[in-house]
Image (cartoon, rainbow, N blue to C red):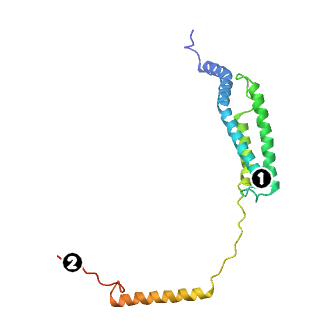
Amino acid sequence: EEGEDQAKQVYMDKLTELKKFGTPIEIRYQEAEERPKLLEELGHKLRIYAGITEEYKNKDEKYIHIDESEMNKVEKCISDTTEWLNNVINIQAKQSLDQDPVVRVNEIRRKLREIHSLCEPIVNQPKPQIDSPKQEEPPDTSINKTEELEEEIKNIEATQQNGDCHMNESPVSMDLD
């Protein structure tokens, strides 16, 4: 009477029936746990890029080399994503926890990837390097350097021939016990 003699299929059917009710609850729970963190991360990224566009408008040297049309793309992406984010947050706040979420975690991750792939290459463009003309040394200094090197070589050779390591030093007197 308790199902001891039932076939395996009966248990499998019961498990499937229970999963119909349990799986959506489990998914909602996971979504409710992860969504606020990702929404905060998305908001943080948007604030960073908005700050960069403000610095660009204020002619900051870090970003002055970036083309205006490129920065307009970043600004449009930020405004569109911010509008989407605000709408999603407002609608989701009205939902109860026992209803399916308005926005899923994978959608937020996709938005994060989109703004990262569009904005990051633009704002991290390296400044073009300006080649400064190389200053050549006047030929007189190279002759002087050559003469100095020849003198050093002669001094080294003289030291090696005499066996003295310290030619110009006076002998040191030592007290012997």
Nearer to us in this view, 141 or 35: 141
Where residue 26 appears, as percent x and y from the top left, is: 65, 26
Q: In this rendering, is residue 175 above or below 69?
A: below
- SS for callout 2: loop
Taking the image as shown, residue 167 lies to the left or right of residue 131, namely: left
Q: Nearer the viewer, residue 86 or 155?
A: 155
Circles 2 and 1, Cβ within 8 Å, touching? The answer is no
Kindly identify which residue carries mark 2: 175
**Badge 2: residue crowd in 10 Å (few <14, some 14–19, many ≥20):** few
Q: Position of residue 42 (x, y in %)?
A: 71, 40
Q: Which mark is residue 163?
A: none
Based on the displayed image, in which of its 4 quarters is residue 156 positioned?
Answer: bottom left
* Residue at the spot of label 1: 58
Q: Which residue corresponds to the image point at 43% horizontal and 90% vertical from the top-left?
A: 154
User: Toward the viewer: 110 or 141?
Assistant: 141
The mark total stands at: 2
Quarter of the image containing the N terminus?
top right
Q: Quadrant of residue 16?
A: top right
